[in-house]
């Protein structure tokens, strides 16, 4: 049996998937992980402003087809860095869904040059043009089940019950 380690892109994307489980928006669960020099510098998920009501408790607040109660995962990760004084220049972002146009602009303006995503989601044509125009790259990550088979979350839950 091979002891091959999980590749970096799948390792960081798995963290974004885990973050998405904390989402408080019922329309789409998204997670984002900011990475610099192979180290996680911030994480975010889509949810309400701290102290506000959550969509899971009070439904989404939809205006023009968008939930305006929710801050996107990418923005929450970027804002965490801003709040804590952590530079994002030269960082990479791993996000469960292709970023919307507004998040793409914020990501690029923050100096992030690599955007990794798991799922296509309304991939905006102008966002894609901006990514290439500023010299950033975009990469769709494919999670390979072989790296996750050895996880036995069911067994962990059983042990917690005894």
Image (spheres, rainbow, N blue to C red):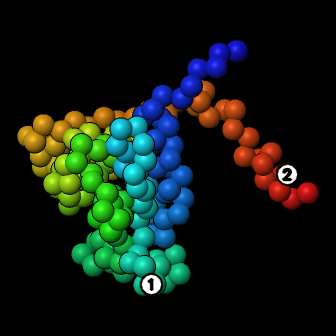
Outermost right residue: 162
Q: Which residue is mark 2?
A: 159
Q: Is residue 31 above or below residue 54?
A: above
Horizontal relation, residue 106 to residue 146: left or right: left
Q: Considering depth in this image, is 19 or 98 the residue closer to the camera? A: 19
Tag shown at residue 144: none
Distance of label 1 from label 2 (alpha carbons): 35 Å
N-terminal label among 1 and 2: 1
- Which residue: 42% across, 60% down? 44
Q: Is residue 66 above or below residue 8?
A: below
Q: Which residue is mark 1?
A: 51
Contact between marks 1 and 2 (CB within 8 A): the answer is no
What percent of the width, then of the height, locates residue 61?
Answer: 36, 81
Q: Is residue 114 above or below residue 123?
A: above
Residue 7 visible from this viewpoint: yes
Q: Considering depth in this image, is 32 or 36 the residue closer to the camera? A: 36
- Which residue: 48% across, 65% down? 23
Q: Secondary structure at mark 1?
A: loop
What percent of the width, then of the height, locates residue 79?
Answer: 31, 65
Which quarter of the figure is the C terminus placed in? Answer: bottom right
Query: How crowded is the residue under tag 1: few (<14 C-alpha within 10 Å), some, or many (20+)?
Result: few
Horizontal relation, residue 37 to residue 156: left or right: left
- Which residue: 64% across, 20% down? 3
Query: How crowded is the residue under tag 2: few (<14 C-alpha within 10 Å), some, or many (20+)?
Result: few
Residue 72 visible from this viewpoint: no
- Which residue: 51% across, 43% down? 14
Which quarter of the figure is the N terminus placed in? Answer: top right
Q: Secondary structure at mark 2?
A: helix
Outermost front residue: 85
What percent of the width, then of the height, locates residue 39?
Answer: 42, 42
């Amino acid at each position: 049996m091979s002891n091959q380690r999980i590749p970096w892109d799948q390792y960081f994307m798995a963290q974004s998937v885990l973050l998405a489980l904390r989402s408080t928006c019922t329309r789409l669960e998204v997670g984002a992980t900011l990475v610099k020099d192979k180290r996680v510098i911030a994480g975010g998920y889509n949810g309400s402003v701290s102290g506000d009501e959550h969509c899971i408790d009070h439904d989404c607040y939809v205006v023009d087809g968008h939930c305006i109660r929710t801050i996107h995962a990418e923005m929450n990760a970027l804002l965490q860095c801003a709040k804590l004084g952590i530079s994002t220049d030269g960082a990479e972002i791993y996000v469960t869904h292709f970023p919307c146009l507004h998040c793409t602009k914020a990501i690029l303006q923050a100096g992030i040059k690599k955007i990794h995503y798991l799922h296509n989601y309304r991939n905006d044509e102008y966002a894609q043009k901006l990514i290439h125009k500023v010299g950033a790259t975009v990469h769709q990550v494919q999670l390979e089940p072989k790296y996750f088979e050895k996880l036995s979350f069911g067994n962990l839950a059983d042990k917690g019950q005894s």
